[in-house]
Each structure stands twice: as structure tokens, then as C-alpha cells.
Image (tube, helix red, strand yellow):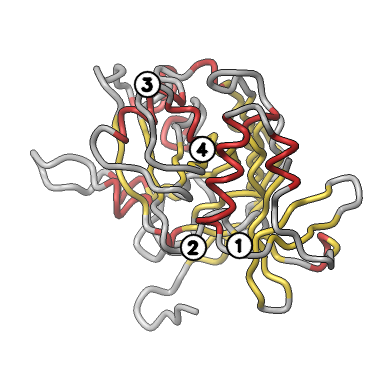
Amino acid sequence: MKLARFAHEDVVSWGLVDAGNASVTPILGDFRVWGPALTRAIAGGNVEAGRAKLPLAVVSYPLADIRLLPPIEPINRVVVAGANYAKHLVHDFGLASPQQPIAFLKAYGALIGAQDPIRYPPLTQELDHEVELVVVIGDDPVSCDDPLSSVLGYAVGNDVSARDIQRSGPSGIGMDLFAAKSQDRSTGVGPWIVTRDEFPTGSPKLRLVLKVNGEIRQDGHTSEMTWDVAHLIKFVEERSSFAAGDIMFTGSPAGVGMGTGRFLNPGDVVEASVEGIGSISNVVGPKAGGKGEKND
């Protein structure tokens, strides 16, 4: 099933998407109640029973009448697990894979929905794209013996990065990943969560594609991950516990601007897709004016 977070006439809700009828039915109540219950039903093989217990409204809205929002509540964390595709590291950065995963936090304010514009930050001249599979944690505590049992489903992400800012960390300190990847209103996530039962057992094996103005820039596969989804969840959980509703980016394949020298420009249409989930399409906005810029 597909679960979306959306706005309709300024009212924000979660909803169950009916792709065939191009509509969404609001889910009543708090995600922290129905999200874990549905995740447990999926983990127990009782998907239909879990769906039947979703507290749905009696009214539905056409998808054309809503705005899709990032599928995460503002109280939850955005975790980014990077350096997870060997070809990406070699071809785009000239680096070998590290001995263990790398993880850090992205600011919630960096997120945008499936069709929102990408804000071009005033401090960068090297705005880059990274299509990624995004994991949505639906239940806690996470079992390190069975990390996937806490996964509600998956979404599409575009981990937009300011590469010149990323390289600006002081000598001996390292890259400034937070500043590079937490720029306001830059990172697309969505269009919705596709629940884990829609995929074969285990870490998903899915094609990832990113296009800029219709031209393919990245074309990879999650089977190329150095560490699969279960390994990444366990790695993070052992260091900082997940909560139901948190999301995690899982790394990007080769082909980013850092390797090709082709960065994003104002007006570019950036489409990120993950097999079995869908696509998000975001237009890069004008370069911000820096001093005096008004931030909505």
C-alpha cells in the first residue's frame, strides 16, 4: 500500500493512496499510534488485517487537489547513511570504501515534497544531486537481530548537496556534511511510502535513476550497496536509537556532479525515481541573493 503525508486546503494529514483512482483517503489519528500497529502487522504477515484497522476518514480527495509533503513528521529525525556505493566513491570522489558505514543527521528544514521547488542556497556554486532509497522506520525499539521488522516501507530521496561547502571543513577536521546537506528546502523526499510487504523479503533490490531535464545522470541499483538496509539500520541503532517515524537515506550510486563536473542550475528539472516506488520531480529555483534574501 501507499501512504502519503499531504496538505489539503492547509490541513496536513496522512493518507492511504489509491493509485488506480488517483485519490487519497485521510488517516485519522496520530502516526505514533497507527504507524507502529501497521508495521507490526506487516512484520507478522497480517497486512490485510493491519490495513483494515487503519482509522480512515469517510471522504477522499483527488491527488490533483493535494500537495504531497515529505513523509515524515517534524518531530522525527532524518538520518543519512553515506559512502555506501563503491563506484560512487571511486568515480565521483576518488576514494575507496570505508571499513564501516558513515551516518549523520540532516536538518528537517532541508526537506521538500515530491513536486516542491529546490531552493538554490546562496553559499554554493556547486549544487549536486543524489538519488537514494529512503527507509521509513515504523516501529521502535528496533531489534538488532531483525532490523527490517521495524521498517514500515520505502520512499524516494534526492539528497541534494552543496559540494563546495562540503569541502570547506577546516584542515584536519574533515568534510562539513551537515552544512552541505542541510541547506533549507533543498532535499526532495516522497512521493509516498510504499509499505515493505510490496517487496520481496530482505533488503530491496531496486533500480535508481536520476534525470536532469530528461537526461539520465545516475542509473544504479541498490544491489550495489556496500551495506544493505538491515546492516545500516543496525549500525545506526547501536549508536543512536531510532524512533517510529524516523527516515534514513541509504547512499547514492555513481554519476553525481562531483564526478562529472555537471552541477545543477536554476530552472533544471530534477527527477529522481526508484523502481517499485515512484518518482519525485523538483525544479531548481533561482540563485538566492544572499544578504537581504527573504526566507518564506
Question: Which one is in front in this view, the residue at disc 3 or the one at disc 1?
Answer: 3
Q: Which residue is mark 1?
A: 117
Marks 4 and 2 in Cβ contact (< 8 Å): no
Query: What's the residue type where badge 2 is placed?
Result: Arg
Q: Which image quadrant for residue 211?
A: top right
Query: What's the residue type where badge 1 is placed?
Result: Pro
Mark 2 lies on a secondary structure that is loop
Q: Position of residue 277 (x, y in %)?
A: 69, 36
Tell me the crowding category of disc 3: few under 14, some 14 to 19, or many 20 or more residues within 10 angstroms, Cα based: few
Q: Which image quarter holds the N terminus?
A: top right
Image-based side of 110 in relation to 34, left or right? left
Residue at the farthest left position: 172
Query: What's the residue type where badge 4 is placed?
Result: Val
Q: Which residue is mark 3?
A: 145
Q: Position of residue 178 (x, y in %)?
A: 29, 51
The circle on residue 185 is 2
Residue at the farthest right position: 21
Mark 1 lies on a secondary structure that is loop
Q: Which residue is mark 4?
A: 135
Residues at marks 2 and 3, CA–CA distance in whole angstroms: 36 Å
Question: Which one is in front in this view, the residue at disc 3 or the one at disc 4?
Answer: 3
Residues at marks 1 and 4, CA–CA distance in whole angstroms: 23 Å
- Residue ID at (12%, 47%): 170
Query: What's the residue type where badge 3 is placed?
Result: Asp
Mark 3 lies on a secondary structure that is loop
Residues at marks 1 and 2, CA–CA distance in whole angstroms: 8 Å
Residues at marks 3 and 4, CA–CA distance in whole angstroms: 18 Å
Between discs 3 and 1, the one toward the N terminus: 1
- Residue ID at (41%, 50%): 78
Marks 1 and 2 in Cβ contact (< 8 Å): yes
Question: Which one is in front in this view, the residue at disc 4 or the one at disc 2?
Answer: 4
Q: Position of residue 242 (x, y in %)?
A: 36, 43
